[in-house]
Amino acid sequence: MVAPRAGSLTRSALGEFPPNPTIIHPLVRLGGLSEAPARLPTGLDPVDRLLEGGFPRGRLSEISGPVSSGRTSLALALAAAATRAGEVAAWLDVANAFDPASAQAAGIDLDRLLWIRDSRLREALEGAERLLAAQGFVLVVLDLCRGVEPGAARALGTPTWLRLARAAAASGTALVVLGRDRFVGSHAALAVDLRATRLRFATSPEWLEGLETRVVLARHRLGSAEGFAPVHWKVPPLARGMPLRAGSACGGGGASAS
Amino acid sequence: MACLFVPDLPAAAEVRAHPELAGLPLAIVSEWGPRATVLSVSPAAARAGVHRGSALAHARSVCAKLCVRVASPARERAGRDALLDVALSASPRAEPAPSCGGGRAGEAAVHIDVSMPAAPLRSEAGLATALAARARALALPAVAAVAGSRPLAELAARCTAEREGPGGSCVIPAGGEAAFLAPLPVDLLDLDDAAAELLTRFGIRRLGPLLELGGQSSWSRLAARLGPELVGLLARLRGEGVEPPIAAAHDRRIEESLDFEAPIDNLEPLGFALRGLLTRFLARLALRHLACGEIEVELRAGAARDRRRLALAAPTGDPRVWLRRLRQALECEPPSAPVDFVRLAAEGCPPRRDQLDLFRPPGPAPAALGALLAELEVLCGPERVGAPRVADDHRPDAAAMARFDPTRRASAGEAPQAGDAVLALRALRPPLPAEVRLCAGRPVWIRSAVANGEVVHSAGPWRTTGGWWSEGQRFAFDAFDVATSDGLLVRLRYDHLRRIWEIDALYD
């Protein structure tokens, strides 16, 4: 006996879909219960394998984690993969923390990234809705890591995320919310949580080599929500040259300064 | 030739600026006071018995519900310009007719050479109907007529206005000039006193006998009696004269102004008035298939003038976007005194064309992207929307922004190798001050708003200096990459000029 597929169960539970293709059932629009959406790869093999191809297009996804866990680096990798494929992406930077040099080092085509900086939360949400409504942006990153009180982000509530999820579904854009905590909740089709596992410092010369993190799949409405992927983030070879000899800087000595 | 004609422009311009007056008996007077005379009347007032040239007191006695407004040159000029815009939407060869005096001072007409129209026409009647409809869309009660010559088209438009009222249209076919002109009175020709007296003595009161007179005798003999101007006019009416050409208009500048009867000192009513003004202004641009990326705003308060230039990232004709931008500008910097006059001016430009790359993903449509950028600029501020740029500067926290144009060729630097994960920095703008303890010139303990505790690893320092040629731009930093006991990886720096420690970025 062949077990029924998840999609057919959904169809039987909801009844047949209406014949008009423009009328889409809300559950289909929001959750993607029956149709597998296209994926937007990050370009990082372990993460793409974990996410079964990347972040889903037309869905609301979430990247969360504490500071220095690699969450911004993951979002930049996603934007880099999209822009280098010739697509157009947008970065709504509520915290005004976007660093163009890091973005360029990550491989982002800066001409194809729309940066909206230092906006208030309300403006960023309205901007996200307009970007989604405009069609043509394959990725919209809503960076709420800093500059937004965690309480304020949580207080946004269901209507906001529902509206954004619907707009993302209508436009086929991957909407990714970047934050310290998970506040999108059940409206996210995909949620990944990042944790730092190890710092890598070279000793001679002293040099920050990188950071090892673990990308944990916290929620995956489109597949199995299990597993993690280790990622080793490397510091780009910036034109810093050799460090000064210790003790020659900062006025030397062991005095404390404030 | 076509003619677009408005019989009472001052009244029409007033109704255009104040749509709530539509359908009411309205009279435009020269001034407030006992000597005021009526310059122009609306159709409702004319039906009630109010006539041009009568005294205001008499007009009020004839029509008790008469609405009275003082003539506004600004509104009238805007109405004339709007009429010309309607004409230019049909053909680039259009010019305003010379203004008449006396009882016809309130009339406005535009002549249009439709031999080379801007778009293919179905028929002359269709063109006339379309012209009248476009004028109605701009709240102008105009009449359109098409005929073989300018004076004939204007005469036909004037007769149609009297016969059918606003919105009518008329076509005089080739060869039908004589039949149309025959029953018309000679007074319509606007003759000078001498010619009028001569025709009266001849007993000629209609155009039919006059044209026959010209046909029976030679034109030169008639010219000797009536004057060469009148004979030339008659020839053009019969379609036999030579029409002087109309030069193509290349001017894309649009101006629309509004003066208030009482100065406005509050932003809310000013915004309400600006909404109507802006809608009319952008409707004129849209009629000529233009948009604008910059609007010049002039606010007058008595003798003081406040001029501003408002710009958007891309040309748009969306009134909501421009109104928001205008309100934003006024809220940021309110007028210093009550405003009694507003003028908007812009150089129209064609909207972006949708020419996409065959070999790249489509992305947003250029026209839609322009409108989107304009909306986002209004929403967040023009200096906050654009494409990121790595600043040409040695300052570690330097960042720049350029106009967002995804059609530009790729400017990405060296891409990381496939599979390489690059650790990114998050900038702290402005940097956060930190309290740091040093040991042998290295940080060993930090206290700040983001990172606190023992330093478990550190690398550095890297010295960056620059801007030494300018007092305001000089900088000198010693930077460390620091990992703290609370799990954070930050970029810590010592500012040699201000002698403080601060955290300017986080690794994330």
Image (cartoon, rainbow, N blue to C red):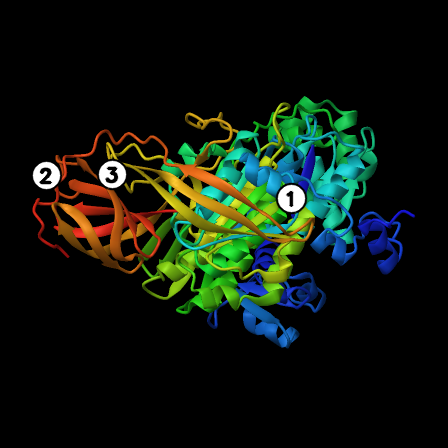
| Residue kind at label 1, given as amino acid type | Arg
When the figure is inspected, residue A157 is found, relative to residue B377, above or below; the finding is below
Which quarter of the figure has residue B247? top right
Q: Is residue B148 left or right of residue B479?
A: right
For label 1, the SS is: loop
User: Which mark lies nearer to you, 2 or 1?
Assistant: 2
Q: Nearer the viewer, residue B31 or B452?
A: B452
Looking at the image, tell me whether mark 2 or mark 1 is earlier in sequence order. Answer: 1
Give the Cα separation between the discs numbered 2 and 1.
Answer: 52 Å
Give the Cα separation between the discs numbered 3 and 2.
Answer: 21 Å
What residue do we see at 45% from left, 42% from top?
A: A73
- Asked if labels 3 and 2 share a chain, the reply is no
Look at the numbered discs 2 and 1 and tell me whether their residues touch, using CB distance below 8 Å: no
Q: Nearer the viewer, residue B52 or A3?
A: A3
Tell me if I can see residue B192 in this picture.
Answer: no
Q: Which residue is mark 3?
A: B395
Q: Nearer the viewer, residue B489 or A184?
A: B489
Q: Which residue is mark 1?
A: A57
| Residue kind at label 3, given as amino acid type | Arg
Which quarter of the figure has residue B149? top right
Q: Which residue is mark 2?
A: A248
Horizontal and vertical percent position of residue A27: 75, 57
- Asked if labels 3 and 1 share a chain, the reply is no
